[in-house]
Image: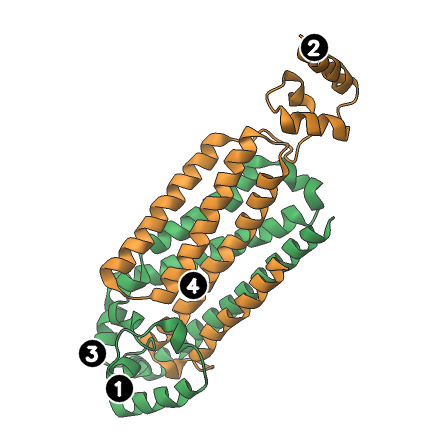
Amino acid sequence: MAENTAVGNFTSYCLTNPNTDFCEILCSNNPNLAICEDIPSYYYYRIDIVANAVFIAIFSISLIGYLGTYIATRRGLGFTVAMTLGLIAEILGYSARILSWENQWSETPFIMQLCCLTFAPAFMAAGIYLCLRRIVFTFGAENSRIPPQWYTRIVCVYPAEVYQLLN
Amino acid sequence: MTSGDNIMVAGLSFQVFTLLIFMICSIDFATNTMRRHRKLGDEAFSQHASVVAVRRSWRFKGFVVALSLATVCIFWRSVYRIAELSGGWSGPLMYKQGLFIGFEGVLIAVACMALNIFHPSVCFKEMMEGEGGLEMSIKKGRPNRDMVQDSAGSLQGTTNAAGRASLA
C-alpha cells in the first residue's frame, strides 16, 4: 500500500518534471511504469525488437557460415579470424540493443551497443584488406604499382586503433 | 559531446580514411591492369595454369564483385556513423531508427552475406594458401601457412621475386 502511494507520488512528480535525473533513474529501475513512456532515455525512439532479433539471426548464420567454410577448406585463417571477431562484435552489439529494448534507461547496454557496433566493421574491413594482395597475385604482381605485400600492411594499423579504443 | 564520443568519431574517421586508401589502391590496380592488358594482351597477366583457371572461373569474378560490394557497404555505413555520432548523443540522426537499421544493420549484413556466398577460400582455392601467390607455396613446400604470418617483414618481397623468377 505504502509502495503504491510512493509510485503515485513519483508519477505525479514526473508528469510535471519529465526531464529530471530523478525520473530517468526511476525508469531505469522500473522501466515498465506507464509514466516512463514520456521520460527521456538514451534513445530517441522506441527500439524495434524485430529488426534487432533478425540481425542477430543473420549475423549468427553468417558466423556459422564462415567457421564452417574454414573447417571445410582449411584456407584463409586470417580472413576467417577477422570476420569472426567482427561478427561476434555485431552479435554482442545487437544483443545489447535487445537489452536496451527491455530498459531504454539503462546505461550499460547503451554503451555496449555503441562500442560493439561502431568498431565491429573495422575487423571486417581488415579481412577485406587481406584479400586484395591475393587478387593482385591472381592477375600478376607486375600489374601493381606497389609490391602486393604492402596491401596487407594496411591491416597492421588496426591494433593501434584497438589499443586506442581500450584506453 | 563527450570524450568517449570523440574517440568513437576519431576511430570511425580513421576507418573511413583506411577504407578510402584501400579503394584508391584497388582502383589504381584495376586501371593499371586494364591498361597493361590493352597494351600486352594476355601476357600482361600471370600465365601459370592454375592462376589462369582461377581467373577465368565465375566464382572468382563473383568474389571480386562481392568484395567490392562489401567494401562499399562498410564505407557507406562508416560515413553514416560519423554523421550520426558527430552530433553527440543527441544529434539529429540519433532520432531516426530507420536510418540506423538501414545504414548500420542492413549494409553490414549485406557485406557479410556477400562474402559468405562468394567466400575467398572457396573462390580462390589455392590462391588463399601460402603467400597468396602460388610462388611461395610451391617454392617453400608449405601450402598451409597462415596469411597473417606471411604479411610480416620485408624479406618476403625478395623471396617472392625469386619465386616468380623461377616460375617464369
Location of residue B149 in the rendering, given as x and y in whole percent from the top left corner: 39, 75
- Tell me which corner region of the image, top left, top right, bottom left or bottom right, holds residue A50: top left
Residue A2 marker? 2
**At 70% from the left edge and 29% from the top edge, which residue is drawn?**
A24
Q: Any idea which chain is the orange one in this picture? A: A
Residue B139 marker? 1
Chain of the residue displaying label 2: A
Q: Quarter of the image for the C terminus of chain B: give it.
A: bottom left
Using the numbered discs, state the Cα–Cα distance from disc 2 to disc 3 in whole angstroms: 84 Å
- Tell me which corner region of the image, top left, top right, bottom left or bottom right, holds residue B119: bottom left
**At 35% from the left edge and 78% from the top edge, which residue is drawn?**
B37
Q: Residue type at mark 2? A: Ala
Residue placed farthest to the top in the image? A1
Residue A128 marker? 4
Between residue A80 and residue B67, name the one nearer to us. A80
Q: Can residue B168 be seen in this view?
A: no
Using the numbered discs, state the Cα–Cα distance from disc 1 to disc 3 in whole angstroms: 16 Å
Q: Is residue A113 left or right of residue B151?
A: right
**Residue at the disc numbered 3:** B49
Q: Is residue A60 depicted above or below B155 in this figure?
A: above
Q: From the viewer's perspective, is the residue at label 2 or at label 1 nearer?
A: 2
- At numbered mark 2, what does the secondary structure look like: helix, strand or loop? helix
Q: From the viewer's perspective, is the residue at label 1 or at label 4 nearer?
A: 1
Using the numbered discs, state the Cα–Cα distance from disc 4 to disc 3 in whole angstroms: 26 Å
- At numbered mark 1, what does the secondary structure look like: helix, strand or loop? helix
